[in-house]
Image (cartoon, rainbow, N blue to C red):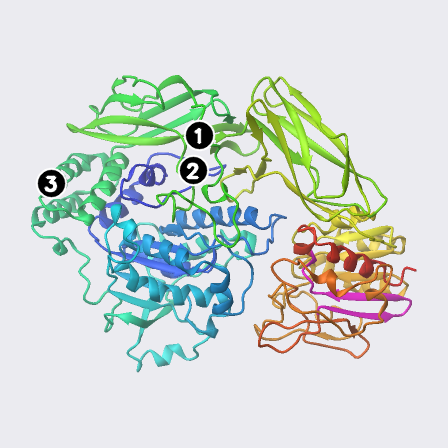
């Protein structure tokens, strides 16, 4: 594990960055199996880059096979961070789920051995065509990022996950292939993006393939025998050193995509993947035909090859440090190489880390505080242990940020040697916000520092560097300063050191609904991240809103203390719905960021500082239902929106449905994907249909077609597509047509106008039914460009004494975005039959 910590922190040429250990990780000296794998990888000089659109698009079987069987450097370039996706495990959306999915990818790469990259493209949600995708993304900027990664990673082979056509199934998918075709050629020309050449050189990739699939090409197992454009590889090979099959490793990696519900069963043994030729030098039988992956690709490296062969022959798994003297001699040979070579520099950095691992060294740097602020101070405790069998490793010095070095001297075997130093963070230090979220953005993240582009995450803000003498040669090794604490259940936990704003501002809701003539309270929590802070707290509202008081004086003296401040909102007749911000002015500084934590057992905990923003919604919004039962699905903010409209929400556990008097509720709502995830709800579905018969209103929000836990979701038949047909409206501006203009849901208690469908975000809806019984009424019609209209956004029926509604409208996106018309429409749905 210590190898994972160091490799990407100290490699000058590396452009990957692994996350710090997540909570529960136990960093320690590298295992003999890991060391042997790394020695074998020194013998392989080659790279393969895999490219697709999103986190979870990557084929971990192929990545694991390339990294662990072929032992080539293997990278995955995801064009987006997945912020437009849904969340099966929590309520994070947008940039927050993008940060979560970034960490899931990093955890996946720790397992399968790949290296992670990103472009600046924003995942704006499902797209049906390449053209739509490229209209929203800045094509030149995405290509800039792709060319940048190609030139830095220098892959001999590039593989795309998807074809550049409709079979890709998503506009982002096909766009990733279209752009890759262009980027491969552009990366080879020094005339393209010449500003990059200060840091990299132009690079010609030898061949481009795509990872074809039986999803869109049937009978691949037969076609590859006669089609010379196809290559088959067995990704199920067994790795005796690791004690695992490569496809087993791949499924463990795949299962890190938990927010997308991609936990995978473990595969073992023979399993084939197929690669189809796109451009470049076509391989005949083997993917690496004509590519020399050995040291022979570099002139005059015979002595290096001989030395490496000797190291492999003599390697002792019980005593890896016995190889250190030979590894250091190998480093000297590489260091004296007379030619300029990317691969020699690359392998020197790999070897430097390997020497650290084989020596049995372990080190850490731990802050006694979880966080500090610009200008603040922290106490850093750094430790190093020589767990190997080399008695004369010497620490020449230890460097701390902004501090003179501390001298250790000889590093005794298996003795925990520590030093504690106080350091001061510069006054102009940046907060530890993910670099792509520092600036406001639309469909492309704004990143001015080109050296950050492509990285999965920020480099550690502060590190401790050891200057170590091993076998007469001096090396520098760095480790990030982190925070470590003990939990009584999980034991030792680690998270990144956080540099926070001096004051953070959190509001209690993302949206406040306040009809004309009403008042609404906003509760603002201010946390003091350092001692003795004062300032003036204000809200900046759209026109026409009254606010009382106009501001609050904030005085917080103790670090970590918090205070809640209350504002009363009241819209005038001219009040506008829209965004508001909160800020504190203190001296010549303005603080305008909140603090958000993303914490799950499978990722490294993330602390983010989004700008403090909310939405205010006004108008004539009425809700007739007062008591609403809510059955949670995969997590959404619809219950909060209902309460903002004046409803009283009670959460219902599916397993308790038989014992609850459901008649007490005016309406019961099933959250998004509840019938995909709640087995007990499926078990007791008949109770819900009986509730409708007895006079209740049951509203079900969208579920995916695949994984539906009940056969008949409504009181009358509803059919969903049996294929991956996209019954969704991705154009948020799609023209709305009322099918049943006089239907109560479109008229009471709020009159729904066509203008209520203005300013929607990302999409109209998703996973619409395809057919339904004649007892249902369909109310709305939309169509995406050049497609047939869809009528399944809302279908409603009366049954017995009650009513049933199924809706695929993306209320879970529109309500947190503060779309007034979505609130009116939902209020009408929840009020149906409640007059």
Q: Residues within 10 Å of mark 3 (few under 14, many from 20)?
A: some
Residue 781 visible within the image: yes
Rendered position, 708 above or below 348:
below
Do the residues under discs 1 and 2 have CB atoms within 8 angstroms?
A: yes
Picture coordinates of residue 344, whole percent (x, y): 17, 46
Q: CA distance from mark 1 to mark 2?
A: 8 Å
Rendered position, 730 above or below 615:
below
Instruction: Choose between 72 and 358: the one closer to the eye.
Output: 72
Earlier along the polypeptide chain: callout 1 or callout 2?
A: 2
- In the rendered image, which quarter contains the C terminus? bottom right
Residue placed under numbered mark 2 in the picture: 20
Q: Secondary structure at mark 3?
A: helix
Residue placed under numbered mark 3 in the picture: 333
Instruction: Choose between 576 and 524: the one closer to the eye.
Output: 576
Q: Residues within 10 Å of mark 2 (few under 14, many from 20)?
A: many
Picture coordinates of residue 296, whole percent (x, y): 12, 55
Magenta-tinted stretch: 793-811
Residue ID at (85%, 65%): 747
Q: Secondary structure at mark 2?
A: loop
Tag of residue 482:
1
Residue 229 location, quadrant:
bottom left
Residue 261 location, quadrant:
bottom right
Q: CA distance from mark 3 to mark 2?
A: 32 Å
């Amino acid at each position: 594990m210590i190898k994972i910590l160091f490799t990407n922190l100290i490699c000058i040429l590396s452009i990957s960055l692994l996350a710090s250990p997540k909570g529960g990780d136990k960093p320690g000296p590298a295992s003999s199996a890991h060391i042997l794998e790394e020695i074998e990888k020194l013998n392989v000089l080659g790279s393969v880059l895999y490219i697709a659109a999103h986190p979870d698009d990557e084929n971990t079987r192929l990545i694991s096979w390339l990294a662990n069987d072929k032992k080539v450097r293997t990278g995955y370039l995801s064009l987006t961070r997945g912020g437009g996706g849904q969340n099966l495990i929590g309520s994070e959306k947008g940039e927050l789920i993008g940060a979560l999915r970034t960490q899931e990818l990093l955890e996946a790469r720790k397992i399968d051995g790949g290296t992670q990259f990103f472009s600046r493209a924003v995942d704006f949600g499902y797209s049906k065509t390449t053209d739509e995708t490229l209209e929203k993304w800045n094509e030149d900027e995405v290509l800039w990022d792709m060319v940048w990664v190609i030139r830095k990673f220098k892959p001999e082979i590039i593989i795309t996950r998807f074809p550049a056509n409709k079979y890709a199934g998503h506009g982002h998918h096909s766009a990733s292939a279209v752009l890759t075709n262009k980027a491969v050629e552009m990366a080879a020309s020094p005339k393209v993006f010449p500003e990059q050449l200060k840091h990299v050189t132009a690079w010609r990739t030898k061949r481009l393939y795509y990872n074809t699939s039986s999803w869109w090409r049937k009978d691949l197992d037969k076609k590859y025998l006669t089609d010379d454009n196809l290559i088959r590889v067995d990704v199920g090979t067994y790795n005796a050193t690791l004690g695992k099959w490569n496809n087993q490793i791949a499924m463990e990696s795949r299962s890190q995509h938990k927010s997308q519900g991609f936990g995978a069963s473990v595969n073992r043994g023979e399993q084939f993947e197929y690669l189809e030729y796109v451009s470049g030098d076509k391989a005949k039988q083997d993917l690496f035909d004509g590519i020399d992956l050995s040291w022979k690709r570099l002139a005059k490296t015979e002595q290096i090859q001989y030395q490496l062969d000797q190291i492999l022959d003599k390697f002792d798994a019980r005593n890896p440090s016995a190889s250190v003297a030979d590894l250091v001699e190998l480093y000297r040979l590489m260091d004296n190489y007379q030619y300029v070579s990317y691969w020699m520099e690359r392998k020197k950095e790999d070897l430097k880390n390997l020497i650290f691992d084989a020596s049995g060294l372990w080190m850490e740097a731990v802050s006694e505080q979880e966080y500090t602020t610009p200008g603040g101070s922290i106490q850093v405790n750094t430790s190093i242990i020589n767990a190997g069998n080399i008695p004369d490793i010497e620490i020449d010095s230890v460097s701390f940020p902004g501090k003179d070095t501390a001298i250790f001297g000889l590093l005794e075997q298996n003795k925990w040697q520590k030093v504690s130093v106080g350091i001061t963070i510069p006054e102009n230090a940046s907060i530890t916000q993910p670099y792509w979220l520092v600036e406001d953005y639309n469909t492309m993240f704004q990143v001015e520092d080109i050296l950050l582009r492509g990285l999965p995450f920020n480099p550690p803000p502060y590190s401790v560097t050891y200057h170590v003498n091993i076998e007469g040669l001096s090396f520098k090794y760095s480790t990030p300063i982190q925070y470590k604490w003990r939990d009584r259940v999980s034991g030792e936990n680690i998270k990144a050191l956080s540099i926070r704003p001096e004051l953070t501002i959190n509001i209690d809701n993302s949206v406040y609904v306040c009809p004309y003539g009403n008042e609404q309270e906003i509760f603002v929590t201010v946390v003091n991240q350092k001692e003795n802070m004062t300032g003036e707290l204000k809200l900046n509202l759209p026109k026409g809103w009254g606010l009382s008081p106009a501001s609050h004086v904030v005085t917080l003296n103790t670090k970590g203390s918090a205070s809640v401040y209350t504002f009363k909102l009241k819209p005038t007749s001219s009040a506008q719905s829209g965004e508001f911000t909160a800020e504190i002015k203190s001296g010549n500084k303005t603080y305008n960021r909140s603090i958000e934590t993303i914490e799950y057992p499978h990722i490294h905990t993330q602390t983010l500082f989004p700008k403090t923003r909310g939405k205010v919604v006004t108008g004539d919004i009425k809700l007739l239902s007062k008591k609403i039962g809510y059955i949670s699905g995969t997590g959404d903010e619809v219950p909060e929106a209902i309460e903002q409209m004046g409803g009283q929400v009670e959460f219902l556990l599916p397993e308790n449905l038989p014992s609850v008097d459901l008649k007490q509720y005016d309406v019961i709502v099933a959250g998004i994907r509840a019938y995909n995830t709640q087995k007990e709800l499926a078990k007791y579905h008949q109770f819900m249909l009986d509730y409708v018969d007895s006079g209740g209103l049951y509203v079900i929000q969208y579920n995916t077609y695949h994984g539906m836990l009940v056969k008949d979701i409504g009181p009358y038949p509803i059919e969903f597509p049996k294929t991956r047909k996209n019954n969704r409206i991705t154009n948020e501006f799609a023209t709305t047509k009322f099918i049943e203009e006089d239907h109560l849901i479109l008229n009471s208690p709020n009159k729904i106008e066509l203008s209520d469908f203005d300013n929607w975000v990302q999409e109209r809806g998703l996973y619409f039914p395809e057919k339904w019984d004649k007892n249902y009424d369909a109310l709305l019609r939309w169509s995406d460009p050049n497609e047939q209209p869809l009528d399944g956004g809302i279908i409603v029926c009366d049954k017995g004494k009650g009513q049933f509604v199924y809706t695929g409208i993306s209320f879970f996106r529109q309500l947190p975005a503060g779309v007034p018309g979505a609130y009116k429409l939902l209020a009408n749905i929840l009020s149906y039959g409640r007059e």
